[in-house]
Amino acid sequence: MKKYSKLIIAVVIALIFIGTFVFLWQKSQPKEIVYSEFTPKQDSIQKTTIITGKIEPRNEVYVKPQISGIITEILKEAGDYVQQGEVIAKVKVIPDMSSLSASEARVRLAEINLEQAKVDYEREKNLYDQKLVSADEFDKVSQQLRQAKHELGAATDALQVVRDGFSKSNASASSTLIRSTISGVILDIPVKVGNSVINSNTFNDGTTIATVANMNDLIFRGNIDETEVGQLSMGIPLKITIGALQDMSFDAALEYISPKATETNGANQFEIKAAVRVGKDDKIRSGYSANAEIILSKADNVLTIPESAIEFSGDSTFVYVVKGDDKQKDYERRHVETGLSDGVNIEIKKGLTAKEKVRGPEIITDDNKEE
């Protein structure tokens, strides 16, 4: 019994040894390399580039006060639509003391001149009624009275403007009412009730009460690399995609290319602007980040193959043309002339026909991965 047990153990060991040897021998044998194959086809190829930028109004208007003072009331808020001339805020005037004193002095002088003109008029009128002076002299005195009345009215108006910001004679055009200079959407109101504001003058740009823009006239602003700017031309179409609007896209047309480059992260880039066509119901906000896709070049109805089938050697390009049948294949290395590439497919100008097949990359199997 012990003999049989030893014999069985020896047989098992021998089988394991032989099996291991056969397995290692099989693994050591070279695997057949299998390549993918492609048939050239007629197709269109276009080379595109993506530019990152933002959407903004073509023109943003800064509404500023005509006088200095304090904000007493704000009638609008950011996001509201306003018509040209519509009141956005009200300002209470804080008069300049020197201007106020000068205006008050002018009123007092005008009152004195008016009183004197009235006395002269009454005296001259009595003489004229007695036919002691000519009509020409009486007309001159009458004219002086009218001028004195007008001067007093003008001085009074000037005093009211300095003191209150408006006069009774032109209350509808009051400079204390801050009106929008264009029709559009209010993008920002950077002031609050109680803030002091100043008007624009030689030494100061003035306080911005509101920023207003026409949101139906938008542009895309971005930068393109110097290696690609030479392929652009005015009027070429762009496709604008706004990620914040669930990848909504809009058509645009290039209308500006900067003549001067700016250095960004060590690369020279040129600013571009494109007019964006939006619908009346499209709700687009100023400052949205956007991507612009531009077609730099295009080739229609050309012979193409995957670029992975191309072998690049210096300035030359080669393909391996499939020869023979499925049982016994051979590959002929052939020089070809290539054209436009979109990064996936490439145009073949010469050296290949649509009836031939070309070798592609090696097909990686699970066995190859294990090796």
Image: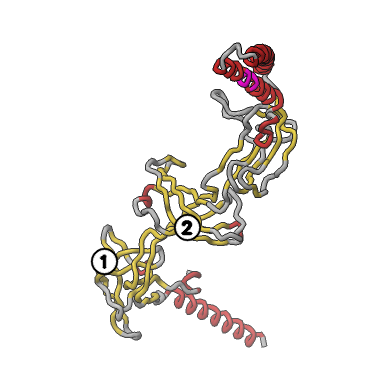
Residue of label 2: 252
Position of residue 317 in the picture relative to residue 95 (left or right): left
Q: Which residues make up the magenta segment?
A: 145-149
The spot of residue 99 in percent (x, y) is 65, 17
Graded by Cα atoms within 10 Å as few (under 14), some (14 to 19) or many (20 or more), the crowding at tag 2 reads many
Whether 276 is drawn above or below 338: the answer is above
Q: Quadrant of residue 176?
A: top right
Q: Does the magenta run of residues contain 50?
A: no
Q: Residue at x 66, y 33 (%)?
A: 170
Residue with the mark numbered 1: 337
Q: Nearer the viewer, residue 336 or 144?
A: 144
Q: Position of residue 39 (x, y in %)?
A: 35, 78
Tell me, yes or no, if residue 101 can be seen here.
no
* Three-letter amino acid code of the residue under disc 1: Glu
* Magenta stretch: dominant secondary structure: helix
Q: Residue furthest front?
A: 130
Q: Position of residue 40 (x, y in %)?
A: 34, 76
